[in-house]
Amino acid sequence: MTWTIHMKHFAQAAGLVRTCAGVFAVCILMGCSSTSVQGDSSWRLVPVADVKQVVGEWDGNLRKEGNVLPVSIQLRIRENGSYLFTGQHAGTVAVGSGFLESRDGRLRGDTDRRTIMFALYDHNGNAILWVDATNQAGERYHGQFTKVK
């Protein structure tokens, strides 16, 4: 059996590969730029000595590591350190709760279902809570919240 590659088809395939590689690179850049605050001087870390600094209602988005689409989340943090979140994505609702404590200028919480860490930032005069979380299956999530006024 002899394979014949026509230059026209080869050029089309090469163009498709270049296009896919370009789209992939743009997605990677978008994902990296949306998940990092380090190196951007407009983001200033605000050490959290007491959970009372972040008490209230927050709205934000979480993105599962490797996913493009974010999940909309509502977060409530109470003075006693407890938190409650609700989120919805593609018809699925998630609800969770736990307790936060201040450690090393950040808020941390561990439950049997997740490990969560919040860092408070001042971004151009706005308070932003940055979250990194890992669930019991080892799936990682990242996102940011703004305070509801």
Image: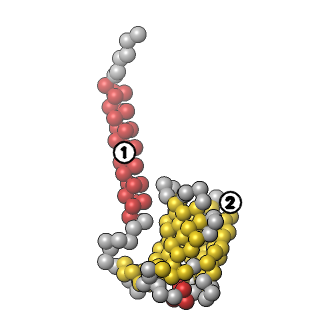
The residue to which callout 1 is attached is 21
Residue 99, percent from left and from top: 61, 78
In which image quadrant can residue 33 be found?
Answer: bottom left
Residue sitting at 63 percent across and 75 percent down?
A: 98
Residue contact between numbered discs 2 and 1, judged by CB atoms under 8 Å? no
Quadrant that contains the C terminus? bottom right
Residue 27, percent from left and from top: 41, 54
In which image quadrant can residue 126 be found?
Answer: bottom left
- Between residue 50 and residue 10, name the one nearer to us: 50
Residue sitting at 57 percent across and 87 percent down?
A: 55
The residue to which callout 2 is attached is 91
Q: CA distance from mark 2 to mark 1?
A: 31 Å
| Residue 111 sits above or below residue 13 on the image | below
Residue sitting at 38 percent across and 71 percent down?
A: 37
Q: Is residue 76 visible?
A: no
Given the image, on which type of amino acid does mark 1 rest? Ala
- Disc on the earlier residue, 2 or 1: 1
Q: Secondary structure at mark 1?
A: helix
Mark 2 is surrounded, within 10 Å at the Cα level, by few (under 14), some (14 to 19) or many (20 or more) other residues, namely few
Looking at this rendering, what residue extends furthest in the top direction? Answer: 1
Q: Is residue 142 visible?
A: yes
Given the image, on which type of amino acid does mark 2 rest? Gly
Quadrant that contains the N terminus? top left
Residue 73, percent from left and from top: 59, 71
| Residue 14 appears left or right of 47 | left
Q: Secondary structure at mark 2?
A: loop
Residue 22, percent from left and from top: 36, 48
